[in-house]
Image (cartoon, rainbow, N blue to C red):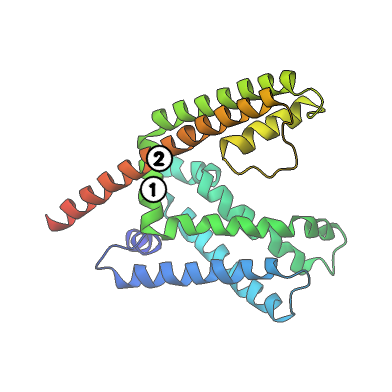
Amino acid sequence: MRRRLFEIIEVARDNDKLSAAYDLLMMCAIVISVIPLAFKEAPEFFVYTDIVTVILFIIDYFFRWFTADHKIGRKGLSFIIYPFTPLAIIDLVSILPALTILSSGFKLLRLFRVIRTIRVFRVFKAFRYSKSIVIIIKVMKKAKDALLAVCTLAMGYILVSALIIFNVEGDSFNTFFDAIYWATVSLTTVGYGDIYPVTTAGRIITMISSMFGIAIVALPAGIITAGYMDALNEEKKSGDA
């Protein structure tokens, strides 16, 4: 029974309709649960939808804890390890805002109104219900060394660019943090225009920095895309087999 329950709550296989229905139900619950964040004062209707979705999240959390040994594969120790895994922590954090429902009767629980925005973490629960997202996560794990190298390169670029522009454009950048902010924005080639160089030397540095930024941003996209295509081909081959 626990094995079948584990198969249902995991990402659905092509021929498992019950698991696919469960994934769809949880995806809908996640979407409905974050809709109130789009309102400053959400309609009262969302109080009831929040109760329903949180009950689903709690049930899902305990189902996953109940079948943790099938997921982690370390027998009894799995049930101790599971609550500390990243996705389990996201599940637990997404449930916490439900305590605001009880806050009208308990003054201490009113403190949890501050964490209303934590509901947004429920979006990350969707990661385990989408096969495409699961593939992307696997690709990122496989390419973690290359991605780490790119992140290190990007951080080095930001630091060096910030140091250069801070010393060249002393009048435009009041603090070193302003320079880091400018370098980060240049890396992404966004350019908000709130902080910018005014001298010729500063503008030349900005042009060079933006060109390097385009190259650095393109690197992780290429790595993930290539890995994703390879993973799709492997999935297709395994399915044909």
Name the amino acid type tagged 1. Ile
Q: Depth check: 85 or 204 in front? A: 204
Q: Depth check: 149 or 190 in front? A: 190
Q: Secondary structure at mark 1?
A: helix
From the image, tell me which residue sits under label 2.
140
Lateral position of residue 34 relative to residue 168, left or right: left
Q: Position of residue 241 (x, y in %)?
A: 11, 54
Observer able to see residue 203: yes
CA distance separating discs 1 and 2: 6 Å
From the image, tell me which residue sits under label 1.
136
Q: Depth check: 113 or 108 in front? A: 113
Q: Residue at x 55, y 68 (%)?
A: 31
Q: Quadrant of residue 163?
A: top right
> Which residue reaches farthest left?
241
Q: Residue at x 46, y 72 (%)?
A: 25
Residue 25 position (above or below residue 1): below
Q: Quadrant of residue 180?
A: top right
Q: Pointers 1 and 2 in contact (CB under 8 A)?
A: yes
Residue 101 position (above or below residue 130): below
Q: Position of residue 170 (x, y in %)?
A: 79, 22
Q: Residue at x 45, y 26 (%)?
A: 149
What crowding class fits label 1: few (fewer than 14 Cα within 10 Å), some (14-19), or many (20 or more)?
some
Name the amino acid type tagged 2. Met
Q: Residue at x 43, y 70 (%)?
A: 24
Q: Quadrant of residue 123?
A: bottom right
Q: Depth check: 73 or 154 in front? A: 154
Lateral position of residue 231 relative to residue 165, left or right: left
Q: How many marks?
A: 2
Q: Position of residue 148 (x, y in %)?
A: 46, 29
Residue 150's tag is none
Observer able to see residue 70: no
